[in-house]
Amino acid sequence: MAKNSELYDLLVRVKNGYDPGWAYYSRYDDDNLDDIRFNENKPGLSSVNIVFSDYDDYLKLYSDLLDEDDIYYLKLFLSNQYQNDFDRYQLQEEWEQGYVASYLNDENKELIDRIAHFISKDSVKMDFTNKSKLLYKEYEGEIDNIMWEWSDIEHNCRMDIIRDEVIDEFSNKFYNLGIKEVVPLYKYKCSVNTLIRLFDMFGLQSGTIFDLFKKILEVNKVSVNSYYNEMYWNTSCTNFDMESFNRSANWNLTRIYEHILDDEKFVDVEEFYDVKNAVEKEFGFDKWNKIKTKENLYFKVDDVDPSTNKIIISFRNNESDNREEKRSVTYDELHRMQTQYELFNEIRKIRDKIFLI
């Protein structure tokens, strides 16, 4: 018959009324015994505190069910040391396809629309995805900041979910036998009576607390999942911090917008925006428009000059040898040319004559 362990003999002595007081419990050759709180009136109900030194120590209980790879990832998840696994190229693709930008609120989407309007002649025809691509091309640094902020929030959200799922999977495995879980995967508590009874039940009077816990898992046929190395990418964030993300995104987008407003090339940035917006919606850029009151005359809007806010057009007369010429006109002049060409032409001739004099 195997000799009882020193721990088992100690538990029996406590049950019979022995107060261990403050003790150096490591001398009982059981690393998981932390403390015994003696109950003078009912010694058998004295409380035994059981602890595991770290997650690695606890997961060794499952050594028959987990391989080294599983344990490696579980420890990373539990200790929150799994690093943000997004890379820059992946995030760029997510941004340019509009996925990251879909997390933006209306205020930030309006900022993107406004910025795109300043830096592209075709913003009206662009969908949001193409506007996102345009911003990344022109303002890579600020968009990188937005993307990394998104990835950090997404990462932390996934990690919180994974950690909760792992703790839920591996915790509370001993409560049905009278062992209370105080801190999941770390601290447990039971009475001296309970611990003696369990050692006797499993015939482990010569064993350790670790041996007992492992035996309980075995008898209860506890099973675990697998493929923990794929768990991160198989987890979806269900509680993304939209407020924090949009606050950060707004800071970066506002920085871009203020940079545009401060650009010295604009004589009047708000007027430029209004002129360009009106022209873009009414005539479009790089598209030939027929002058309604004159046959064979066409014009297309090439650009808006930010230094004057005048509209640069190409003018074409299909009956003339000199079929195309550049002109610079105001928005009102462009309308007059479209609806009152003869008057527009006379005013232009008079203006040119005055200029020559």
Image (spheres, rainbow, N blue to C red):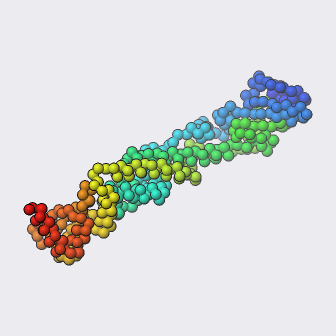
Q: Is residue 145 left or right of residue 198?
A: left
Instruction: In the rendered view, tell whether residue 203 sits above or below residue 323.
Output: above
Query: In which quadrant of the rendered image does the N terminus lie?
Result: top right
Q: Residue at x 51, y 42 (%)?
A: 84
| Residue 355 coordinates in the image, percent (x, y) | 12, 62
Q: Position of residue 143 (x, y in %)?
A: 41, 48
130 is higher (above) or lower (below) than 323: above
Question: Which residue is at 25% across, 71% downward?
Answer: 335
* Residue 91 in view (yes/no): no
Q: Is residue 283 above or below residue 185?
A: below
**Left or right of 312, for residue 87:** right
Tag count: 0
Residue 310 sits in quarter: bottom left
Horizontally, residue 258 falls left or right of residue 337, namely right
Quarter of the figure with the C terminus: bottom left
Residue 28 or 189: which is nearer the viewer?
Answer: 189
Residue at the (75%, 27%) spot, across then down = 30
Q: Is residue 159 left or right of residue 355?
A: right
Residue at (48% x, 48% y) in the render: 248
The location of residue 231, given as percent across then percent down, is: 57, 46
**Between residues 201 and 353, which one lies in front from this camera angle?**
353
From the top left corner, tell me how far across and down residue 287 is, in percent: 25, 66
Residue 320 appears in the figure? yes
- Closest to the observer, 21 or 172: 21
